[in-house]
Amino acid sequence: MSFEKIAFKKGFKDAFPVFISYFAVSLAIGMNAVNAGLTPFQATLMSLTNLTSAGQATAISIIAEHGTLSEILVSQIVINIRYLLMGAALSMKLNQNTKTGLRLLVSYGITDEVFGLSSAQKGKLSPWYTIGCWSMALPGWVVGTCIGSVMGNVLPAIIIDALSLSLYAMFIAIILPTAKHDLTIFILIFVSMLSSFAMFKLFPAISSGNRVIILTIILSVVFALVKPVEEEEENE
Amino acid sequence: MSESTYIYLAILIMASVTYLIRLIFPVLLRKPLNSKFLKSFIHYAPFVTLAVLTVPAIFYSSGNLVATAVGFVVSLLTAWFTSNLPVTCIAGCLSVLIVNLL
């Protein structure tokens, strides 16, 4: 078996838990999308072309409130800005001579989980590993959205309620582990949640999309100035 | 514009900007990011974003406030003690289901 195939298969296998989580979460995304006025086709298309949980959830809530396209644009930039750093990290981990076509393919599937798996690989990253990861994760995301968008209203309310939590459980599962060994992050998460709640109560006229934008910028800037992140050398 | 046009434009805008962000470094820049401030900003941003997206929306994710509050706490505890993504999702969802059944 060629080196590329081995890398692909490893990525594909390693991403199986991600497939499961994405399926569960995307069921709720599909349901929310339809409730916001999207057709099942539009919901599925959104998931296929975006592959973002937080971004899609926010866009769907903006669409539900008939927000402007510029609000959608800005919200996506702010919410997905972390992919910029992930792309930078993965880019440094790839071989310098990796072809553009493969880089384009790798970039498409950069999600929190795919990034996590790819970063954890020792030494240089084969682009095929990352492609294998998202090849496993993507169908979970797309099929789950499709099923959620079609069946959402057929499922019993009690099941819908339970599934609706999965998106938030995933957000928590992404951010909390880092807080265990990083006090700054622990404080940041706590402050963020508190600020979000306070802003929601004090300024209810500000949409959730705008609230995310405002708080992300303010709190990230404050923390970046007060406690900049120290350089870490990449060890090969 | 029609609802349909609005939605397709939204999808197009979202997908374009998201993919662009993803490919800037691997495809276009291919060089490391050097600004300490920007690196720090981007390091902290996802924690704020996801935290703000979670609270207070999680409490309104279904009709029963008690159920979602329990789901919130269970998710926090499970994530803290297992650091496992699918387990946290399943635990959170199950806790909501159980509270609703009681």
Image (cartoon, rainbow, N blue to C red):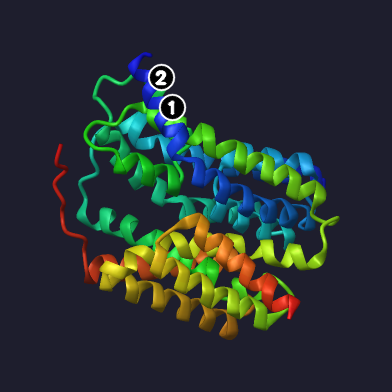
Quadrant of the drawing holding the C terminus of chain A: top left
Residue found 61% across the figure and 36% down from its top: A139
Image coordinates of residue A91 in percent, x first then y, are 30, 34
Q: Is residue A224 above or below residue A22?
A: below
Q: Residue A188: horizontal and vertical position, in percent?
A: 35, 73
| Horizontal and vertical percent position of residue A31 | 74, 55
Chain letter of mark 2 equals: A
Q: Which mark is residue A150?
A: none
In the shown orientation, is residue A46 left or right of residue A95?
right
Distance from label 2 to label 1 (Cα)? 6 Å
At label 2, counting other C-alpha atoms closer than 10 Å, the crowd grade (few under 14, some 14-19, many 20 or more) is few
At a point 48% along the width and 34% down the height, the residue shown is: A108
Q: Is residue A111 or residue B74 the one in the foreground?
A: B74
A23 relative to B101, above or below: above
The amino acid marked with disc number 1 is Lys
Amino acid under label 2? Lys
Which quarter of the figure is the N terminus of chain A placed in? top left
Marks 2/1 in contact by CB < 8 Å: the verdict is yes
Q: Is residue A197 above or below residue B92?
A: below
Q: Residues within 10 Å of mark 1 (few under 14, many from 20)?
A: some
Q: Residue at x 42, y 20 (%)?
A: A101
Which residue bears the numbered disc 1? Answer: A9
- Would you say residue A207 is visible in this rendering? no
List the residue tagged with mark 2.
A5
- Indicate left or right for B93 with A63 as reference: left
